[in-house]
Amino acid sequence: MSDADDTRREWHEELSLAALGRYHPSIAEVLRWFRYDHLPPGLQQVSRDFAGLAVLTASRSQNAETTVALRKLLESKDAAVRASVPE
């Protein structure tokens, strides 16, 4: 298994419901929308990178601007996933 696979597993674990308890409630509320295990494999790949960035952002600081940054990242993730849905 590669280092990238290990990192992705860490992101997935960090987004688990139990792990979200480590974050301020407003940050945890946004982070939960970065979970990607419910998506088809092709869309998981798109969403996974955004999830990683969300975890990194939340782990650096927990303040109002972190929540804003995560909400804007969530908008970008949603658009990228929708853009990747086969027509």
Image: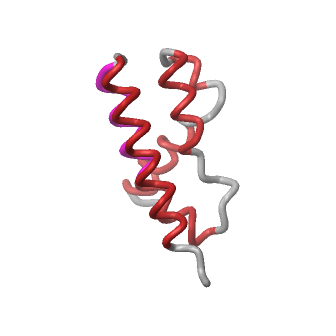
Q: Residue 43 appears in which quarter of the rendering?
A: bottom right
Asked whether residue 58 is drawn in magenta, I would say yes
**Picture residue at 48% right of the left edge, 41% below the top:** 10
The x and y percentages for residue 47 are 50, 57
**Picture residue at 58% right of the left edge, 18% below the top:** 21
Please state the extent of the stretch shown in magenta in the rendering: 50-61
**Picture residue at 57% right of the left edge, 72% below the top:** 42
5 lies above or below 58: below
For the C terminus, which image quadrant? bottom right
Asked whether residue 56 is drawn in magenta, I would say yes
The x and y percentages for residue 59 are 36, 27
Horizontally, residue 59 falls left or right of residue 42, namely left
Q: Residue 53 appears in which quarter of the rendering?
A: top left
Q: Nearer the viewer, residue 61 or 80?
A: 80
**Picture residue at 41% right of the left edge, 55% below the top:** 49
Q: Nearer the viewer, residue 16 or 71?
A: 71
Q: Main SS type for the magenta part? A: helix
Q: Residue 63 appears in which quarter of the rendering?
A: top left
Colour theme: secondary structure
Number of numbered labels in the structure image: 0
85 lies above or below 54: below
Outermost residue, right side: 38
Outermost residue, bottom side: 87
The x and y percentages for residue 40 are 66, 67
The x and y percentages for residue 58 are 38, 29
51 lies above or below 17: below
